[in-house]
Amino acid sequence: MTERVLYLMICGAGPASHVDVAIKLAQEAGWSVYCIATPSAVEHFLDLDELHQLTGHPARTGYKSQGQPSLPPADAVIVAPATYNTINKWAAGIADTYVLTQLAELTGLGVPIAVLPFVNTALANNAALYRSVEALRASGVRVLLGSGGFEPHPPRQGHRAVADYPWHSAINALS
Ligand SMILES: Cc1cc2nc3c(=O)[nH]c(=O)nc-3n(C[C@H](O)[C@H](O)[C@H](O)COP(=O)(O)O)c2cc1C
């Protein structure tokens, strides 16, 4: 059977430390998972060797270096945890990380994309985020913010919200 390729784009917020949960759920749903991480996710939250072990593929943070295998084309994409920073930059057309460059192209190609934000209520109430979410939804991106997806937590309550982060809603959004 041909493998179904899922790009898991990981940004710099608390749930990134538990991305193994998403990898296992996606694999159980039949996806072959390729992790792509922002520099902030790598600096603060991720162990790239562990991601390699879990997925069987090297995690990417930039364009491939010579000798590295190319990524297979994506059948679907999950952006989780999606930060305030990446959501706003993506919607504004900025492409200054490998994750953002890939998202710009994948959105234009019409590949199914599910976004699971992780923002507190202070960031969620910001008009910039509202505008970005509307713009991405208008481009066909599934932004799982609100009921049935991620519900923002009060500031300084992030550690509790990490435990309840609804990874499964992103996987389910693609099936
Ligand atoms: C410990 C820590 C926790 C953070 N938590 C969040 C968060 O919950 N949501 C968020 O949007 N940004 C959070 N940030 C800030 C982002 O990491 C920061 O905006 C960064 O520029 C995001 O880069 P990226 O979008 O390329 O991953 C956190 C940063 C650190 C160091």
Image (tube, rainbow, N blue to C red):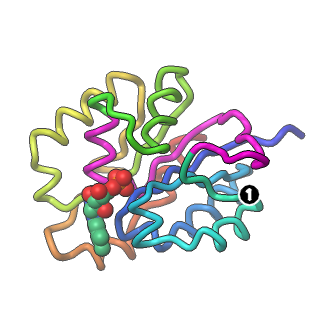
Residue at x-position 14% and y-position 59%: 121
Q: Quadrant of residue 45?
A: bottom left
Q: Which of the pair 22/85 is nearer the observer?
A: 85
Label 1 amino acid? His
Q: Quadrant of the N terminus?
A: top right
Q: Is residue 2 left or right of residue 104?
A: right
Residue 59 visible here: yes
Q: Which residues are magenta?
A: 63-90
Q: Is residue 12 left or right of residue 175?
A: left
Q: Which of the pair 54/99 is nearer the observer?
A: 99
Q: Quadrant of residue 153?
A: bottom left
Quadrant for ligand 1 reads bottom left
Residue at x-position 56% and y-position 62%: 22
Residue at x-position 39% and y-position 76%: 163
Q: Please give the residue where the numbered disc 1 appears in the rendered image.
A: 57
Q: Is the residue marked 1 within 8 Å of ligand 1, measured from its CB?
A: no
Count neighbours of disc 1 (C-alpha within 10 A) and say few if under 14, some if 14 to 19, many if 20 or more: some
Q: Is residue 12 left or right of residue 133?
A: right
Element type at mark 1: loop
Q: Is residue 73 magenta?
A: yes
Check the image and name the residue furthest to the right.
1
